[in-house]
Image (cartoon, rainbow, N blue to C red):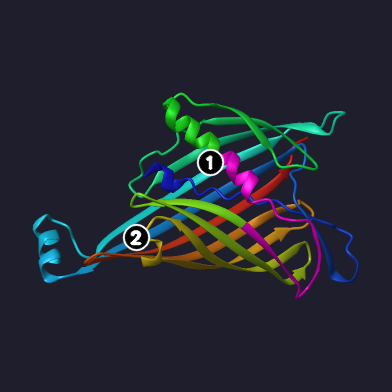
């Protein structure tokens, strides 16, 4: 359940402050000597439904299996990412600290005070090199480290010059194990620049999920999904100050005399407050 929490999206953008004719110089980076306070919440609902003969459904019922089986999860997280002074080579230190991380029952997922260290630059996303936490075993500590690092790597957005009304698309891979199957998904995300008002740029976000299923019976498997959201960029601070995404995912598996359907919905919300470190 802890891994479900780790839906940490870390988007960063550089939006040129002196833009003529409302042209956005869209880039991706963190800035030195800057503090990024982030609050993230996520909630999910999983609905698992079995279809088949009365005999099969009766056997499931006798084993105490609810049909459909509905599971709800949620998590809230507060973290702060701090960057230090830039050196002659153009690099600066990065420290991420978890301030709060709890599930729907108020149970701590990642201990408060957990720290991740790394380095960043004006031309590349941070590269982590270590994690320090008193309350994590080595296995989960490594999981946290790998997922946070992969978030930086997979969510890099391309550099673009955009006018209001224009869009760009980003493709990202996602591996999702479900019921013993290894599902390699592709997420196609389209960012549409809706408007620029003052120091903020506003995007509409649309996602389409497609999948390649590594299984001998892949012709009996259907995987699909969509996502919609909004993204707000703080132009002078080069960062996303609000990110909202609602996702729907459907997985259907038909094998012999049973059909298994998994429907998942997920809502992700993230806000950031950016301040300079003197």
- Residue 38 point in image, percent of width and height: 59, 47
Q: Residues within 10 Å of mark 1 (few under 14, many from 20)?
A: some
Asked whether, in this view, residue 73 is left or right of residue 272, the answer is left
**Tags 1 and 2 in contact by the CB under 8 Å rule?**
no
The mark total stands at 2
Dividing the image into 4 quarters, which one contains the N terminus? top left
- Residue 16 point in image, percent of width and height: 84, 57
Q: Tell me which label, 1 or 2, sits earlier in the chain.
A: 2
Q: Which residue is mark 2?
A: 46
Residue at (52, 37) in percent of width and height: 99
Residue at (85, 30) in percent of width and height: 89
Q: Which residue is mark 1?
A: 147
Q: Nearer the viewer, residue 75 or 70?
A: 70
How far, Cα to Cα, is label 1 from label 2?
22 Å
Q: Which residues are magenta?
A: 148-171
Q: Nearer the viewer, residue 175 or 108?
A: 175
């Amino acid at each position: 359940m802890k891994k479900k929490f780790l839906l940490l999206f870390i988007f960063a953008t550089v939006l040129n402050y002196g833009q003529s004719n409302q042209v956005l110089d869209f880039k991706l980076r963190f800035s030195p000597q800057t503090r990024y306070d982030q609050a993230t919440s996520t909630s999910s609902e999983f609905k698992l439904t079995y279809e088949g003969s009365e005999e099969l459904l009766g056997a499931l019922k006798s084993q105490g299996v609810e049909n459909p089986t509905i599971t709800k999860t949620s998590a809230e997280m507060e973290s702060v990412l701090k960057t230090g002074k830039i050196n002659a080579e153009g690099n600066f230190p990065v420290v991420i600290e978890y301030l709060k991380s709890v599930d729907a029952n108020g149970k701590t997922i990642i201990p408060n005070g957990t720290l991740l260290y790394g380095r960043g630059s004006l031309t590349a996303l941070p590269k982590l090199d270590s994690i320090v936490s008193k309350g994590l075993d080595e296995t989960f500590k490594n999981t946290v480290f790998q997922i946070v690092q992969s978030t930086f790597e997979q969510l890099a957005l391309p550099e673009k010059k955009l006018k209001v009304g224009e869009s760009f698309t980003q493709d990202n891979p996602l591996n999702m194990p479900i019921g013993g199957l290894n599902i390699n998904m592709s997420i196609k995300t389209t960012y549409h620049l809706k408007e620029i008002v003052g120091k903020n740029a506003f995007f509409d976000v649309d996602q389409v999920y497609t999948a390649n299923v590594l299984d001998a019976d892949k012709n009996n498997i259907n995987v699909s999904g969509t996502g919609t959201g909004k993204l707000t960029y703080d132009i002078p601070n080069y960062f996303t100050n609000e990110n909202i995404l609602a996702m729907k995912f459907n997985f259907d598996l038909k094998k012999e005399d049973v059909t298994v359907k998994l429907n998942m919905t997920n809502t992700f919300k993230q806000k950031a407050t950016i301040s300079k470190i003197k």
